[in-house]
Structures are given as C-alpha cells and as structure tokens.
Image (cartoon, rainbow, N blue to C red):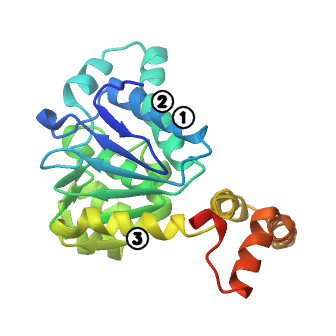
C-alpha cells in the first residue's frame, strides 16, 4: 500500500518512517491519515512482532503543518472538530497497536511530534535532540496530544513546558518520563534494532497479551485487577505458546518462535 508522507517497510519488525523532510516531517491531514491507515494495517497482521518509528532527514517531526493548521482554523465548528480528530485517531491507532511500538526520534521533536513519542511504548531520543511543546507560542495549545503526554510527564512538568514553550533536551525528556533513554545520535538506529530484537525473543502472543493488559489494569480496582491478572496468567500458561516456552527453558533450548 502506498502512503502519503510515509514510508513503510513491512516485516516481523516493521519500519514506519515519516517521509516529508522538506517540511521537517511536519504533520498535515494527509500525514495523519497515512499514519492511521498504516497502523490499522499493522494491527491486522499477525506476523508483525514490533514496529520502529523514525523520521527521514535532519528532524524527526517539527509538529503540525502550520499551513494546514491555519486553514483548518477557518472551518465551521463541526468540520473543525472532524479535522482536529485526525490527530487523536492517529495517536490512538499507535497507542492501541497490538505489538510494541518503538520510536527513535532525532533532531527537532516539537508539538504533535511529542504526541507521537508519547503514544509509543518505548521512546528513544538522540542525545542532542531538541523538544518543545511550542503550541502556546502559536496562539494555540497542546490539546489533543495531552491525552497521551500528560500520563507520561504529569501536570507539574506540563505547567512548566506547556506554558513557556521553551526548548528542552533529551536529558530533561528522560527525567520527566517522556522518553526511556537518550543515546548518541549515531547509535540511535542500532539501539532501536536491539530493543526490537529483544522483543522478538519473547513469545509473540505473550507480548500482545502483556501490552493489552497494562492499560486495563490501570483503571480497575484491586480485586478486579487480581481477577484479570489471574485469568490472563492461566490462559497464557496453558496455551501452546506458554507450554512451549516453559518446556524450552527446562530443556535448555531456544523456543520455536525464535527459530
């Protein structure tokens, strides 16, 4: 399938690359639709084990396409809501992708680009990357992305970085929980590949089950959490994959899914 502003290399570890370097990979409505379609297709492919998201050119993502945002601001309210929903649909498709999504971001990562980082499961940053929630400097605010950013950075960090629009570095992003690790820019791709390789060593159904379980646990009471966790463990432990994994460990051999 062909996508606008996007390159997708299918495989067990699928590569999704923002490919609009002439605009620093700024996101337009077409970019958002392409990302949503790509992740919807990935979600339906049982052969995919992990996804790596990167950006082509010197910057991962400069945020929203300003020309698109300006024109969208002229739409009637109902049409404006549909247009704004495109970003939410994209971030939700990334967040709910059934396999782990790794983002390896470099250069400038502004606005909506930070929303994409927050929606991914594992976030790596080049150690010289520059971030900014720059929306307030444009007379708008980080609204839609907050649904994914706030759970990562918390209200205290949002009060500072939303309200100032200041640029911060990879070290600060890791400290506030927006990213997991900052690595040398030259090592960023290799680090993402290594993390994906570790995911592939795990049982594919177990990984999918673990990702699906985590958001459910966070919204349940203790007794419900325990019940769901017990049910999940019993199901996985008695499954063919679970029995194979346990047997492989006892027999000191690699499980069949790694062969």
Q: Do the residues labelled 1 and 2 touch (CB within 8 Å)?
A: yes
| Dot 3: element | loop
Q: Is residue 237 left or right of residue 256?
A: right
Give residue 230's position: percent from left, percent from top: 85, 72
Tell me what residue is drawn at x 31 percent, y 69 percent: 191
Q: Is residue 120 left or right of residue 137?
A: right
Q: In this view, does 252 lie above or below 133?
A: below
Q: In this view, does 77 lie above or below 85?
A: above
- Spatial distance from mark 3 to mark 1, Cα to Cα? 27 Å
Q: Which sits in the foreground, 223 or 17?
A: 17
Residue at label 1?
A: 40
Q: Which sits in the foreground, 239 or 23?
A: 239
Give residue 43's position: percent from left, percent from top: 58, 41
Give residue 166's position: percent from left, percent from top: 18, 59
Q: In this view, does 225 lie above or below 33?
A: below
Tell me what residue is drawn at x 82 percent, y 71 percent: 237
- Badge 3 crowding class, 10 Å Cα cut-off, few under 14, some 14 to 19, many 20 or more, is some
| Dot 2: element | helix
The nearer-to-camera label among 2 and 3 is: 2
Give residue 59's position: percent from left, percent from top: 17, 49
Residue at label 2?
A: 37
**In which image quadrant can residue 7 be found?**
top left
Residue at label 3?
A: 177
| Dot 1: element | helix
Sequence-first tag of 3 and 1: 1
Residue 141 seen anywhere in this rendered image of the structure: no
**In which image quadrant can residue 187 be found?**
bottom left
Q: Which sits in the foreground, 32 or 9?
A: 9
Q: In this view, does 89 lie to the left or right of 203?
A: left
């Amino acid at each position: 399938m062909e996508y606008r502003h996007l390159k997708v290399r299918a495989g067990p570890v699928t590569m999704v690359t923002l490919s609009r370097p002439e605009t620093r990979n700024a996101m337009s409505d077409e970019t958002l639709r392409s990302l949503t379609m790509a992740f919807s297709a990935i979600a339906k492919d049982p052969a995919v084990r992990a996804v790596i998201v990167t950006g082509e050119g010197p910057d991962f993502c400069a945020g929203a396409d300003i020309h698109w945002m300006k024109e969208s601001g002229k739409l009637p309210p109902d049409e404006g809501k549909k247009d704004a929903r495109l970003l939410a649909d994209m971030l939700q498709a990334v967040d709910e992708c059934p396999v782990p999504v790794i983002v390896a971001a470099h250069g400038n990562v502004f606005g909506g680009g930070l929303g994409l980082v927050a929606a991914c499961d594992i976030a790596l940053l080049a150690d010289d990357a520059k971030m900014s929630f720059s929306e307030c400097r444009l007379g708008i605010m980080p609204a839609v992305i907050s649904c994914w950013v706030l759970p990562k950075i918390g209200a205290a960090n949002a009060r500072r970085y939303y309200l100032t629009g200041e640029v911060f570095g990879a070290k600060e992003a890791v400290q506030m929980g927006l990213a997991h690790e900052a690595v040398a820019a030259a090592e960023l791709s290799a680090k993402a590949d290594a993390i994906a390789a570790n995911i592939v060593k795990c049982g594919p159904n177990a990984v999918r089950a673990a990702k699906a379980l985590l958001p459910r646990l966070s919204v349940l009471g203790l007794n419900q959490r325990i019940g769901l966790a017990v049910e999940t463990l019993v199901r996985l432990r008695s499954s063919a994959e679970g029995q194979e994994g346990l047997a492989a460990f006892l027999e000191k051999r690699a499980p069949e899914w790694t062969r």
